[in-house]
Amino acid sequence: MFIGVIFVVVLFIYLSLRMQAQKSDHHYYNEVYNIGLVQGFAGHDFTVYMNDSIVFDGTITQEPQRIEVKRFAEETSLLIVNKATEQVVVFELPNDGGTFSFERNDEEISMRE
């Protein structure tokens, strides 16, 4: 009986450690996002976030402003924040990366097709 209890305890510890190791595995992605702020952004302050990470913060001096970011999360959202008005625009980006262009027209930011 004692050997059986020890075996079960050791088995549960082993499975627990194995599950914990599987959870901590980091997944690396190959996809790249090419973001272009192409029209209406020059001379203004913007912060661009990808998920919760800042990928650009400052004044856009010339257009187009190009930002290249390697995918680092399972789902990807792009947030463009106008610092002057604190307006936030959110775009959901596909998981396969790609090139995306954005334009600003009368304080409205849209994705260029």
Image (cartoon, grey):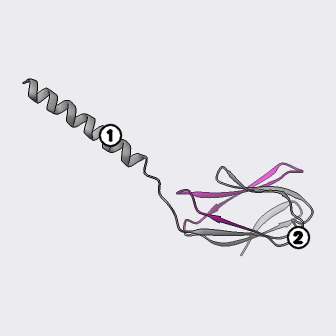
Q: Which stretch appears magenta?
A: 67-95
**Which quarter of the figure has residue 44?**
bottom right
Circle 1: element type: helix
Position in image of residue 6 (x %, y %):
15, 28
Position in image of residue 71 (x %, y %):
58, 62
95 relative to 111 in the view: left or right:
left
Position in image of residue 21 (x %, y %):
37, 45
Residue identified by numbered label 1: 17
Kind of residue indicated by mark 1: Leu
Residue identified by numbered label 2: 62
| Residue at the extreme left of the image, as rendered | 1
Kind of residue indicated by mark 2: Gln
Of callouts 1 and 2, the N-terminal one: 1
| Residue at the extreme right of the image, as rendered | 43
Relative to 18, residue 55 above or below = below
Magenta-drawn stretch contains 106: no
